[in-house]
Image (cartoon, grey):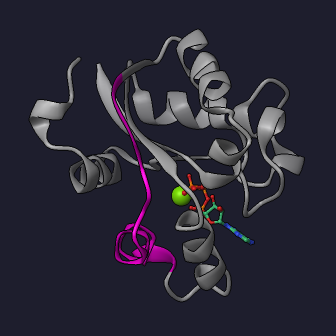
Amino acid sequence: MSRTFSIIKPDATRRNLTGKINAVIEGAGLRIVAQRRIRMTREQAEAFYGVHKERPFFGELVAQMTSEPVVVQVLEADNAVPAYREIMGATNPENAAEGTIRKLFALNVGENSVHGSDSDENAAIEIAQFFSDDQIVG
Ligand code: ATP
Ligand code: MG
């Protein structure tokens, strides 16, 4: 078993899709072992997306992630990082496979409904940014 970090983004919480997205996650066999709804601060979003600081869409990304509540989650599964990225689908929903969260729900490349960690190392860093060990119950 391993863990990954997930965010249900503002475009999805705004449309009341938390339960529908969780149903896809659980239907694919991933277990939600921690979950909390928060309003991300600008500081949290800038730190979280620090690797994208130089990208042209960074300001838009931070504005979007702080615009409305998000749901932060820890997911557990065999090979959790690639397992979740597979069910998330491609970053741009136009390229996402049938049945993936982004194909089902995303609006566009910026408002793409979910985040998932891209490596075990980043998963550990991202989980620690939002959860302490005692808040994760596997
Ligand atoms: P995430 O990190 O959110 O799971 P990802 O790994 O598929 O998504 P990244 O390349 O890490 O994609 O980009 C991070 C986020 O930045 C994307 O999820 C998206 O919201 C936003 N983003 C990426 N590319 C663009 C773009 N060309 N225009 C606007 N926003 C973008
Ligand atoms: Mg990414």
In the depicted structure, whether residue 34 falls above or below residue 127: above
Give the quarter of the figure containing the N terminus.
top left
Above-or-below relation of 43 to 119: below
Q: Position of residue 32 (x, y in %)?
A: 40, 22
Q: How many discs appear? A: 0
Q: Could you tell me residue 53's position as x and y percent? A: 49, 84
Is residue 43 a member of the stretch shown in magenta? yes
Residue 115 located left or right of residue 11 = left
Could you tell whether 92 is left or right of 76 in the image? right
Residue in view at x 68 percent, y 35 percent = 16
Q: Is residue 92 left or right of residue 85?
A: right
When asked about the image quadrant of residue 100, the answer is top right
Quadrant holding the C terminus: top left
For the point 68% across and 33% down, the residue is 17
Q: Nearer the viewer, residue 106 or 121?
A: 106
Residue 103, picture quadrant: top right
Look at the image and give the residue range highlighted in magenta: 33-52
Of the four image quadrants, the one with ligand 2 is bottom right
Q: Is residue 111 magenta?
A: no
Q: Position of residue 87 (x, y in %)?
A: 64, 29
Against 123, residue 99 (above or below) is above
Q: Position of residue 75 (x, y in %)?
A: 39, 28
The residue furthest left is 134
| 36 sits to left or right of 137 | right
Residue located at (21% from left, 29% from top) = 136
| 124 w.r.t. 51: above or below | above
